[in-house]
Image: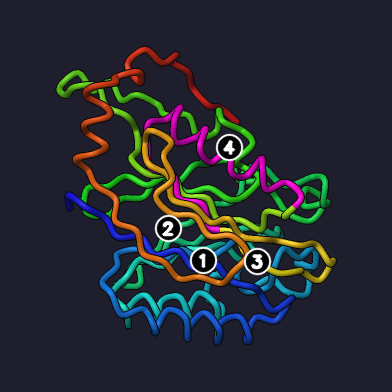
Amino acid sequence: MQSLLITTIQSDLHWENKQANLKMFEEKILQIKEKTNIVVLPEMFTTGFSMQPEALAEKMDGDSIQWMKKIANKKGIVLTGSLIIEEDGQYLNRLIWMLPNGELGFYDKRHCFSLAGEDQHYTSGTKRLIASVGGWKINLCICYDLRFPVWTRQVIHSDPDKEPAPEYDVLIYVANWPEKRSHAWKSLLAARAIENQCYVVGVNRIGNDGNDISHVGNSMVIDPMGSILYQKEHDEDIHTTKIEKAILADVHDKLPFWKDADHFLITD
């Protein structure tokens, strides 16, 4: 696939109301008429950013996962967003990568947001997830991960039978990022695109949550040079952006900064 269509859904959320959120997002997704490959929902899209996992967590065979399977299959899309999962007695802020055929991958948020006590309620993940769609490699992250560039730094493959190449093409962040730190959100998304020479997609919510914390969205799609292809503030919005392999390849070829990067290994 030389181009990839990514649909971002910026929305308010019903606080700690799974059924209302699933109904709302189903209506929004089913109204998408244009072709798309990936639909991205915010962080904890079924509940909002809640510190009540004991009451709200689901298993991996729960209603929300089944809903994602149904919607992904019905629309023929990859559907992604994070929700609260309980597994082996631990609570996880888990991003689900749901394929149209019902197969899935997942990523557990590495950096729990200690300022809100997330680290007291949820277990941090230890592994990155780089998914693949039609030859595109996509690195998946959640909200607070954005502040830690080492976690998403490109690792240059060094297969002796192939030319060295960046590890991924697109970096996706799903978030509940508050209005009062919007400048950091916008600046860091652009920085991640520039330093990794990749497309960056950030999907944030709008509205006040159950703790009266305001969110204004600023969902964005940014190209490998740091230019903004899409940005929306304040309003609910469903938007599809086309990204191009040729543009990515041109940047990598003409400005091969990635070849001079430090080599490193991330360990737990």
Helix, strand or loop at disc 3?
strand
| Of the image marks 2 and 4, the number of the one nearer the N terminus | 2
In the rendered view, tell whether residue 117 sits above or below residue 49.
above
Disc 3: which residue? 206
User: Residue 225: where, in percent of width, then height?
Assistant: 38, 33
Say what secondary structure mark 2 lies in.
strand
The residues colored magenta run 180-203
Callout 3 amino acid: Ile
Query: Mark 4: which secondary structure?
Result: helix
Residue 207: % across, % down = 70, 69
Residue placed under numbered mark 4 in the picture: 188
- Is residue 191 covered in magenta? yes
Which residue position is annotated with label 1? 41
Mark 2 / mark 1, whichever is N-terminal? 1
Spatial distance from mark 2 to mark 4, Cα to Cα?
26 Å
**Given contact means CB atoms under 8 Å apart, are the residues at marks 1 and 4 in contact?**
no
* Residue beneath the point at 52% across and 50% down: 173
Residue at the spot 43% in from the left edge and 45% down from the top edge: 228
Q: Are marks 2 and 3 in contact (CB under 8 Å)?
A: no
